């Protein structure tokens, strides 16, 4: 996680970038004013560029929130490959679809055959379809598999009817191709949401760079030599923008343009600051659990791999703690889900406050937390930490003006240089120890011991 010092440094950088942007824009506009008519055309071109960047920033923000769905689902399938069952996959697809916006349907192809689709209503005809039998879609599917990266396709005509932008994300398990995830985006709804708060300053159009298919605005804008053109990168592809410049005569006096140049400079600096800040927020939020603001499963994986490989290299001990809240379902049933959410936040904060800054506390789903303890010195050190956590939860917690007892069960596994194991085995051993704690009556901790 970022420290306060890092955030202050970042804030200074954002302000510096905003100041530099504002100064550069002011100088540029002053030069335009001095050059009169020729400068006026350049000024209009710059306005179109700023507007295009604003449009793309809104589209990019809306698009990223959808692309994370496929990336997260791919991680889930990769991690739980041995436990996947059709009903579980369908439930995950349903949950992701219900939480998302602008998504017509989600699909998972095993191999190249579309095996799971949610919602099934209006999409039954595509279940069982092999992408290799769909020439208009196969090229992008093959590109995603060959490059091992996500590919944005479309808008395209869908087999089930209508048009949509489709994001293909391939899944590779142990280096072998397993299947591909398809997120079908409702194009009109998606673009309407992206542009809903955008000032209507210019007429503009968007098309795909490879097919030249115009899916928003007037296609004649692309053939007009006076329109501003810009290209934006999307996953394994490009979008082209055409924005019509203003064509009014250069009739305003110098003072009016100087005032306008100051205003535009300040706005450009303001926009640069918030674009940088917002992009940072998006990248940070993508790695945090939305409820507790602790590292999510994706960030946990990175932290766990780094700690594990560091321990192997420098012959250190690390430990993994798998933690569940005892009888959490009963808490939800008795007090409601809002109360349960507050319990999750409080438990996460309690665990984190009793560990070092270098340790990682992650919520990986439901009432399950994973703790990574770096550079522990002995098994007794691990036991002391577990005992301390158990003791902290022996007192009632004040949750929404109610005092309740919340207990936890802990399963512990550890890596020792003299008994090397894989990271996957280490994680599995922590889960097994957690199950043993539950079997022993809960509200306790268990250290995994090999038979």
Image (cartoon, rainbow, N blue to C red):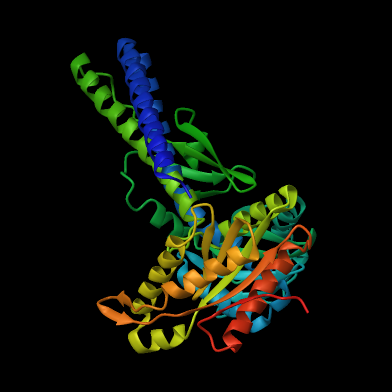
The residue furthest front is 380
Q: For residue 157, say whether it is visible.
A: no
Quadrant in which the C terminus appears: bottom right
72 lies left or right of 44: right
> Image point 72% across, 48% down: which residue?
314
Q: Position of residue 135 (x, y in %)?
A: 74, 60
Give the residue displayed 76% in from the left and 76% down from the top: 450
Rendered image quadrant of residue 14 = top left
Displayed quadrant of residue 427: bottom right
Looking at the image, residue 397 sits to the left or right of residue 377; the answer is left
Residue found at the far top of this picture: 34
Q: Residue furthest right?
A: 176
Q: Is residue 366 above or below residue 195?
A: below
- The residue under the point 69% across, 77% down is 84
Evaluate whether residue 5 shows in this view.
yes
| Quarter of the rendering containing residue 302 | bottom right
Q: Is residue 152 above or below residue 323?
A: above
Residue 370 in picture, x, y percent from top left: 56, 67
Where is residue 381? Give x, y as percent: 59, 63
Where residue 260 sits in the image (x, y, percent)?
24, 25
Number of marks in the rendered image: 0
Question: Residue 58 versus residue 416: which sits nearer the camera?
Answer: 416
> Relative to residue 207, is residue 28 drawn left or right?
left
């Amino acid at each position: 996680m970022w420290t306060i010092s890092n955030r202050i440094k970042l804030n200074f950088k954002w302000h510096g970038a905003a100041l530099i942007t504002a100064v550069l824009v002011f100088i540029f506009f002053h030069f335009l004013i001095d050059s009169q008519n020729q400068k006026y055309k350049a000024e209009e071109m710059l306005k179109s560029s700023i507007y295009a960047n604003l449009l793309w920033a809104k589209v990019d923000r809306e698009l990223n929130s959808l692309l994370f769905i496929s990336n997260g689902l791919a991680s889930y399938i990769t991690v739980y490959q041995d436990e996947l069952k059709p009903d579980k996959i369908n439930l995950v697809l349903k949950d992701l679809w219900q939480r998302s916006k602008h998504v017509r349907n989600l699909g998972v192809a095993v191999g190249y055959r579309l095996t799971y689709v949610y919602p099934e209503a209006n999409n039954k005809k595509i279940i069982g379809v092999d992408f290799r039998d769909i020439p208009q879609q196969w090229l992008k599917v093959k590109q995603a598999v060959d490059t091992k990266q996500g590919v944005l396709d479309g808008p395209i005509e869908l087999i089930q009817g209508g048009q949509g932008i489709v994001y293909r994300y391939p899944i590779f398990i142990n280096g072998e191709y397993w299947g591909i995830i398809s997120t079908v985006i409702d194009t009109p709804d998606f673009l309407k949401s992206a542009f809903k708060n955008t000032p209507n300053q210019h007429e503009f159009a968007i098309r795909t760079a490879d097919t030249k298919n115009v899916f928003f605005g007037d296609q004649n804008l692309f053939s007009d030599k006076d329109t501003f053109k810009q290209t934006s990168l999307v996953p394994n592809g490009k979008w082209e923008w055409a924005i019509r410049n203003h064509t009014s005569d250069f009739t305003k006096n110098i003072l009016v343009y100087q005032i306008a140049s100051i205003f535009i400079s300040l706005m450009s600096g303001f926009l640069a600051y918030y674009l940088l800040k917002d992009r940072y927020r998006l990248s940070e939020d993508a790695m945090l659990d939305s409820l507790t603001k602790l590292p999510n499963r994706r960030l946990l994986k990175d932290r766990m791999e780094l700690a594990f490989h560091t321990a192997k290299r420098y012959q250190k001990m690390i430990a993994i703690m798998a933690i569940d809240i005892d009888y959490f379902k009963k808490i939800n049933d008795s007090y409601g889900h809002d109360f349960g959410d507050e319990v999750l936040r409080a438990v996460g904060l309690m665990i984190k406050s009793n560990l070092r800054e270098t340790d990682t506390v992650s919520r990986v789903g439901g009432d399950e937390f994973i703790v990574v303890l770096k550079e522990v010195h002995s098994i007794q050190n691990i036991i002391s930490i577990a005992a301390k956590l158990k003791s902290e939860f022996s007192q009632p917690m004040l949750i929404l003006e109610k005092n309740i007892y919340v207990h936890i069960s802990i399963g512990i596994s550890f890596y020792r240089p003299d008994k090397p194991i894989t990271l996957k085995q280490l994680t599995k051993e922590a889960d097994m120890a957690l199950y043993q704690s539950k079997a022993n009556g809960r509200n306790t901790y268990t250290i995994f011991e090999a038979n």
